[in-house]
């Protein structure tokens, strides 16, 4: 019904415009020039004011928190083994996967021996920069993970294997795929970006973004502790920032197995805030793509919150 009304209204406007043009043509004189210019100018101004009044900037904001355990004695993240009987498996898996990215690696890759060594932190004041870049890298890897279908399972000692959960990525109507070297070069300036295992992982991943959008990793030192950001932007449409910033340190640790008291005394839990901000420009607020971009950003933010809700 709405489509029919729109078609009839458009047809009526076209017929009225044609009739007006014919009358002006048949009765043209200099006396018509002034009123016609006034009508055109007035109509244009009225249309501009009406459209501008309807367009408003939109902001989406969400927040989460996370932490990592750092071994001051080794000068790197604590090596956490994701043992099967862990009471909080999701937490242990997150600590293990993130910590591994910041530790030395050695192995065989397609028949070639490769390795990665980490420049260990020698002073506690350097820990924040080390952990900030590590969490920034993990965030980028998580965003790439969100771009594909994920099958998740859970297990606990009492109930055994739980029901699997299938998660599908948000389906953008207008999208682009970032892959291979274009994806790997994003971490060129991150201290962990030279890890060949991580780079190959990214080269074989896919990151789905809105068509025409770009993504960069940034570091900001405007106020207080540095912010480590992943920024996605599309000119005249939006700017989405996901930032990680240190909030505190604690001697309290999660329940971990097979660690001596001496080892635990050398460990600290570093707490970080994850803030997610999306700014959608007023000038394209009425564009049909904008609503889809907003839903995509909200979905991303909710998934990041869920991933860090241990």
Image: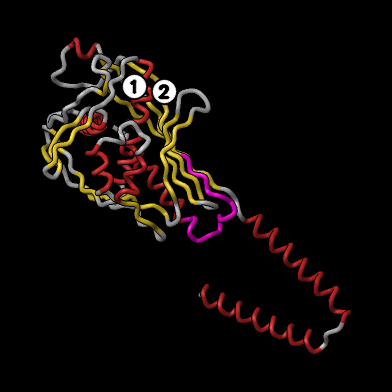
How many numbered marks, from 0 up? Answer: 2
Give the left or right position of residue 239, taking residue 194 as reference: right
237 relative position to 230: left or right: right
Residue 221 or residue 29, whichever sits in front = 221
Q: In terms of secondary structure, where does tag 1 sit?
A: strand
304 or 32: nearer the viewer = 32
Q: Position of residue 193 (x, y in %)?
A: 31, 36
Q: Residues within 10 Å of mark 2 (few under 14, many from 20)?
A: some
Counting residues from the start of the chain, the first of labels 1 and 2 encountered is 2
In magenta stretch: residue 44: no
180 sits left or right of 298 in the view = left
**Above-or-below relation of 71 to 229:** above
Residue 16 numbered tag: none
What label does residue 247 carry, if any?
2
Give the distance between the C-alpha atoms of the residues marked 1 and 2, in whole angstroms. Answer: 8 Å
Looking at the picture, how far across and down is residue 16, in whole percent?
69, 82
Q: Residue furthest right?
A: 31
Image spot of residue 150 (x, y percent): 24, 48
**Which residue is rendered at x = 51% and y = 74% of the image?**
3
Locate residue 256, reporting x and y percent: 19, 21
- Residue 216 vertical placement versus 89 (above, below): below
**Residue, x 42% and y 46% (percent of image)?**
215
Nearer to me, 272 or 210: 210
Report the residue at 31% width, 51% height from top.
179
Q: SS class of the residue under badge 2?
A: strand
10 Å crowding of disc 1: few (<14), some (14-19), many (20+) = many
Q: Which residue is mark 1?
A: 270
What is the span of residues highlighted in magenta in the rendered image? 277-291
| Image-quadrant location for residue 117 | top left
Q: Residue at x 23, y 33 (%)?
A: 97
Is-magenta flag for residue 281? yes
Picture quarter with the C terminus: top left
């Amino acid at each position: 019904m709405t489509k029919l009304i729109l078609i009839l209204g458009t047809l009526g406007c076209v017929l009225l415009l044609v009739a007006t043009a014919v009358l002006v043509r048949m009765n043209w004189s200099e006396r018509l020039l002034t009123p016609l210019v006034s009508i055109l100018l007035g109509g244009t101004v009225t249309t501009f004011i009406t459209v501008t009044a309807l367009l408003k900037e939109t902001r989406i904001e969400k927040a989460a928190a996370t932490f990592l355990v750092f071994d001051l004695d080794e000068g790197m993240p604590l090596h956490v083994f994701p043992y099967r009987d862990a009471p909080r498996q999701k937490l242990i898996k997150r600590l293990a996967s993130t910590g591994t990215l910041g530790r030395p690696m050695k192995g065989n890759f397609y028949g070639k021996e490769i390795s990665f060594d980490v420049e260990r932190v020698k002073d506690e004041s350097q820990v924040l920069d080390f952990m900030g870049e590590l969490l920034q890298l993990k965030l980028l890897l998580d965003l790439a993970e969100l771009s594909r279908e994920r099958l998740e399972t859970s297990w606990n000692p009492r109930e055994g294997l739980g029901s699997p959960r299938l998660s599908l990525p948000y389906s953008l109507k207008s999208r682009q795929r970032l892959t291979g070297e274009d994806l790997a070069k994003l971490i060129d300036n991150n201290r962990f970006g030279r890890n060949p295992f991580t780079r190959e992982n990214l080269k074989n991943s896919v990151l789905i973004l809105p068509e025409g959008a770009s993504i960069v990793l940034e570091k900001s030192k405007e106020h207080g502790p540095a912010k480590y950001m992943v920024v996605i932007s599309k000119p005249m449409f939006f700017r989405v920032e996901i930032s990680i910033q240190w909030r505190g340190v604690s001697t309290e640790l999660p329940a971990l197995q097979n660690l001596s008291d001496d080892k635990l005394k050398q460990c600290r839990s570093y707490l970080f805030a994850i803030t997610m901000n999306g700014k959608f420009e007023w000038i394209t607020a009425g564009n049909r793509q904008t609503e889809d971009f907003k839903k995509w950003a909200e979905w991303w933010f909710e998934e990041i919150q869920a991933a860090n809700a241990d």
